[in-house]
Image (cartoon, helix red, strand yellow):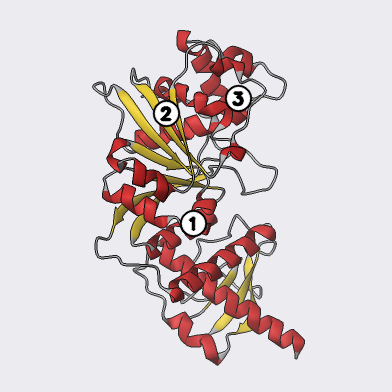
Amino acid sequence: MRTIERCRDLDVLTQVLAKRPQGTSLRQVRGTKTREHHLVLVAPATVALCALDAGLVNEGRKTLRLLMINAGMLDALDEGQWFRYVPLMLDSRASMQVTANVPDRSVMRESTVRKAVTDGFRIEVRRQEGSLEALLAAIDPKEFDLAVCMHGQGLWRSWQGDGVRQLVLAGVPVYVCEYSPLLAQLGIATAGLWGIEAETVIDRNRFALVSKVQGENWARTIWRCRNARGDWEAVTADERTLATTASRMVLDSHQRGLAEQPFPVGACVQGLRLTDGTAAGDDLVHAMDGVVVSPSSGRVFQWNAAADALGVAGSCDPAWHQLLTERDPEWDDGCRLLWAATVKQCWLTSQTDRVAA
């Protein structure tokens, strides 16, 4: 079992690394009143988990060539020198070579403990400003062993999926981090529109940066791009509209404090009861935010956490009843999210229209 696997959180991980000759500089970091290791080691620890999942840990590897996609202020801290600890976390003798793809130099920041990694020995870190596509036009994707994006929403919001496709087609393991499982599902859905098959590999990253907002921790959920369709051509206008709707609905959930959903989004729910104590039935699907629908009857329910039961909320309008029946049990997480977001939008719109009337 490697170091990264044995440690339950960043406190333990930092303590273990600081006892080793290569990690002595972490002693002063761990001793800071602001506990800076909770900030500077999130990205390296997450990258180590991704490398482990990708099977990139072996005795014969001399260099781990990492591409940080759409790097931001935290993962590009102190010129990216904190990634020097990735091999140490993996008990590997490999050196690190990092290419940081950043939007522009404005994201480059310094931590209060930068001297711990910038004095003396340095790893090789290249900074490439601009889009991922521009970077891959200059550098062969096969030059990278691993690609990690710590800011998934920024990547897909700017529709940079083509660069990710190039990496996947070149055989590079690509991992994307999100603040919540809900955002990860949205990312998987958007990737699907680019002809990329993806799945969640780590639902709760124990090395994520804890936030004051429940359910929103930086790098909390990690998903991986598995395959890219060779016959894919382009994202259609309808697909962009679908993705935009899904993004709006997910953002609405986060703003309402519902980053943690009561049930899996777009999934069947069984064994629930109504507030009057009777069985709710088995033909039920959770859309989003506790809104549960019956595709056969068109009835809509709202989950009441305090009562641990469903309350009857009404019925769907005939105009979008067919949408409920279009759900396919074989859909992946991404397709279920797109369907659920559309159902949520229809329900919110119908409720607004009723109030206005």
> Image point 27% across, 60% down: which residue?
229
Q: Is residue 287 visible?
A: no
* Nearer-N-terminus badge (1/2): 2
> Could you tell me which secondary element the residue under label 1 belongs to?
helix
Give amino acid for label 1.
Trp
Q: Residues within 10 Å of mark 2 (few under 14, many from 20)?
A: some
Q: Residue furthest front?
A: 138
**277 or 293, which is in the foreground?**
293
The residue beneath circle 1 is 156
Q: How far from the left and from the top, in percent, is residue 328?
A: 37, 74
| Mark 1 vs mark 3, CA separation in Å | 29 Å
Q: Which of the labelled discs sits on residue 37, or is there none?
A: 3
Q: Quadrant of the N terminus?
A: top left
* Nearer-N-terminus badge (1/3): 3
The residue beneath circle 2 is 5
Q: How far from the left and from the top, in percent, is residue 223?
A: 42, 49
Quadrant in which residue 162 is drawn: bottom left
Q: Nearer the viewer, mark 1 or mark 2?
A: 1
Give amino acid for label 2.
Glu
Q: Which of the labelled discs sits on residue 174, or is there none?
A: none
> Image point 47% across, 13% down: which residue?
121
Q: Is residue 255 visible?
A: yes
* Nearer-N-terminus badge (3/2): 2
